Amino acid sequence: MSLAEDIALAEQCAQRAQASARDAAAAAAALGEALSRARQLTASLQEQALRGGVDPPQRQQQQQHASERDHAQPPVPEPVRERRAEAVQFEAKCRELRSQCTSAQAARDALSSGNISVLLSGIEAHVDDAHAQAASFAAVATLAAASPDAEAQLVSSGALQLATAALQHHMADTSVVEAVCRCVTALTAATQHKSGSGSVALLPLLVKSLGAHTGTPAVQESCLRALKSVASSAEHKARIAECGGVDAVVASLRSHPQDARVQESGAAALRNLAALAENQVRAARLGGVEAIVAAVCTHGDSPAVLEAACGCLRNLTANVANQALAAQAGAIPAVVAALRAHVQHAGVVQHACGCLWALAVAPANKATCASAGGVEAVVEGLKQHPTVPGVQQQGVGCLWSVAMDAGAQARAGAAGAIEVVIAALAAFPQNAAVQEAGCGALANICWSKPALQARARAAGALRLCEAAARAFPDHKGVAKYSRLAVGKLTPDGKSGSS
């Protein structure tokens, strides 16, 4: 190849190289423009994501996946759809029935119209549907609470057995458990329904429900109320304890110390369970005594909590060891404070006096009770409720126990205890418990105080103690303490009885 040809070829290559360079520059510019648009789009999508909460491409991807799942899932069979539709209609009927049957007359109308049979049949037919079960048992609870006749028919028609089935199927559903437990409480209001065969199978399920929903106060309250209602007979109390009921109740009290409804219902349930000696010991071992004392201290403004808690403490301290345990936890000043604060409330007065009576069985607690102002508080409670037998029995009994302490005798005399005890003896001549406690209280208050003995005689105490002996000749307690009181009140120790 000649030189001229070589030069021509070189020029051609240079031209091609220049063209390639221009193409590369154009491509680079186009790429830069594309990248700029991509950045703008990314910024826009990020801004949308901040406003909408989900990145748009991500949302589109989710929608696409949901659509794919919808296409992948088989259609709901027609019978299932029909069954659910029937359940929805049943729920609506239950809500309507519940709204209508808030009075005794409306409940009786429901009985006569056959609505109860329809209701119970629907519960059985829709046992697998949680919504239907919750609505239907709420209606049953309303009916049973409105009329004793409705309660009786519901129980005789198997409502408690249906409640058992509902808990077995829907233990994890808070709405069902709450409705069923409220229903059980209403269905076992009558004494004859508390210990029947229909309630026996419910006991372990109620305990299990309480343990399954520890974090839901409303369910805790409803379970505790149901347990309180069915813990009537000794057999039921023992069975509940065997199922872990005492443990579950104490755990609930300790888990919800600020919730007044849980504290009230828990104390009431434990009060019933603590009527058994073995449950008193178990509750104390679990911290139940301290939990109840804490309830009295924390909820001093709630008469309902105080009444239940003092009644519970009364049963728990039937155990001697628990008397010391409660005193160490501050029970005596707490109960005296509750008595003073709610002296107009007969329930609080009755159970607070009963609690102090039980605590004062321990010799060391008698002086503590007196120094805390217990004698004066009890006397005031007796004055406020002269016609309430429970108040008079528990209050006079408390004075009887506390007045074994010499310091308490002087305080009782100064507070007017002699006069309120004599008034109780006169008001309830046929009440053996009041007569026994009254005679014992007079004997202790006047034990070694001639001035108090003379005051009691002047107020008619001797005559009333002799009348008590005549009214209850076969009652060992009345016979013993009326004789003791007459001996203390008779001048020179000579009995005035005929």
Image (tube, rainbow, N blue to C red):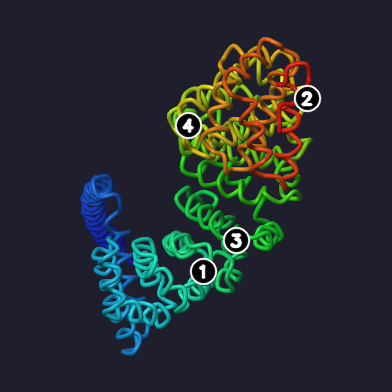
Point out the frontmost of discs 4 and 2.
4
Q: Which residue is drawn at 75% across and 26% down?
A: 495
Q: Which residue is drawn at 31% across and 61% down?
A: 6
Residue beneath disc 1: 167
Residue beneath disc 4: 386
Check disc 1 and report its element: helix, strand or loop.
Answer: helix
Q: Which residue is drawn at 24% across and 68% down?
A: 96
| Residue type, label 1 | Leu
Are the residues at dot 3 and dot 2 in contact (C-beta closer than 8 Å)?
Answer: no
Residue beneath disc 3: 208
Q: Where is residue 29 in the image (x, y as percent from the top left)?
A: 22, 50
Can residue 339 be seen at all in this image of the molecule? yes
Q: Distance between the residues labelled 4 and 3?
A: 44 Å
Can residue 32 be seen at all in this image of the molecule? no
Are the residues at dot 1 and dot 4 in contact (C-beta closer than 8 Å)?
Answer: no
Check disc 4 and report its element: helix, strand or loop.
Answer: loop
* Mark sitting earlier along the chain (3/2): 3
Point out the frontmost of discs 1 and 4.
4
Numbered badge on residue 496: none
